[in-house]
Image (cartoon, rainbow, N blue to C red):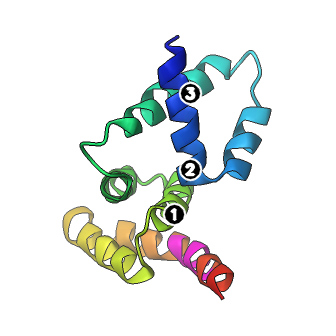
């Protein structure tokens, strides 16, 4: 394991997804999923520290790719991350409409459906 990459990944993961979310995921680590969580943190999130793409840009890419895969629970997580990374609800709407054109209406419907409670909660926090 590359400890520096893991530490950068853990910091980025908490910054984007929130410390509470990450701590909850890591509190469920056991012998079955320990290596998975390590790889996820070290490689997926560790590579976010490459500043060629900004976190905001990575969020847009992730939303498109995760939508295309139809993984809506993970999509919701990344909607939260996209809001953290500075996307506005209006920009999310534009991303989802773009997803409609390339992935189809059923996926876009799911995107809007799963994003709405996350966006509503974000707006409520904003006051």
Residue behind mark 2: 15
Depth check, mark 3 against mark 1: the one in front is 3
Is 4 within the magenta?
no
Q: Are marks 2 and 1 in contact (CB under 8 Å)?
A: yes
Q: Nearer the viewer, residue 109 or 48?
A: 48
Q: Earlier in the sequence, mark 2 or mark 3?
A: 3
Q: Which residues are magenta?
A: 115-120
**Residue at 47% in and 52% down:** 71
| Number of other residues with Cα within 10 Å of mark 3, as a class: few under 14, some 14 to 19, many 20 or more | some
Residue 7's label in the rendered image is: 3
Q: Does 79 appear above or below 3?
A: below
* Residue 22 position within the rendered picture, expressed as x and y whole percent measured from the top left: 67, 43
Q: What predominant SS class does the magenta segment belong to?
A: helix
Task: Indicate which disc, 2 or 1, sits on the residue closer to the N terminus.
Answer: 2
Residue 59: image x %, image y %? 38, 56
Q: Quadrant of residue 106?
A: bottom left
- SS category of the residue bearing label 3: helix
Q: Is 13 left, or right, of 82 in this rendering?
A: right
Q: Give whichever of 16, 4 is nearer the camera.
A: 4
Query: On residue 112, which mark appears?
Result: none
Number of callouts: 3
- Upstream in sequence: badge 3 or badge 1: 3
Q: Is residue 118 magenta?
A: yes
Residue 84's disc number: 1
Residue found at the far top of this picture: 1
Name the residue furthest bottom: 127
Quarter of the figure with residue 63:
bottom left
The residue depicted at 39 percent of the width and 39 percent of the height is: 48
Residue 34 location, quadrant: top right
């Amino acid at each position: 394991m590359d400890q520096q990459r893991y530490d950068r990944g853990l910091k980025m993961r908490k910054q984007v997804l929130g410390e509470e979310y990450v701590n909850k995921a890591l509190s469920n680590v056991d012998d079955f999923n320990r290596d998975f969580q390590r790889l996820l943190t070290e490689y997926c999130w560790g590579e976010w520290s490459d500043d060629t793409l900004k976190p905001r840009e990575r969020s847009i890419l992730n939303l498109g790719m995760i939508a295309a895969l139809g993984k809506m629970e993970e999509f919701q997580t990344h909607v939260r991350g996209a809001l953290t990374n500075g996307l506005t609800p209006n920009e999310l709407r534009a991303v989802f409409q773009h997803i409609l054109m390339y992935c189809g209406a059923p996926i876009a419907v799911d995107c809007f459906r799963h994003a709405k409670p996350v966006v509503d909660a974000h707006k409520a926090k904003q006051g």
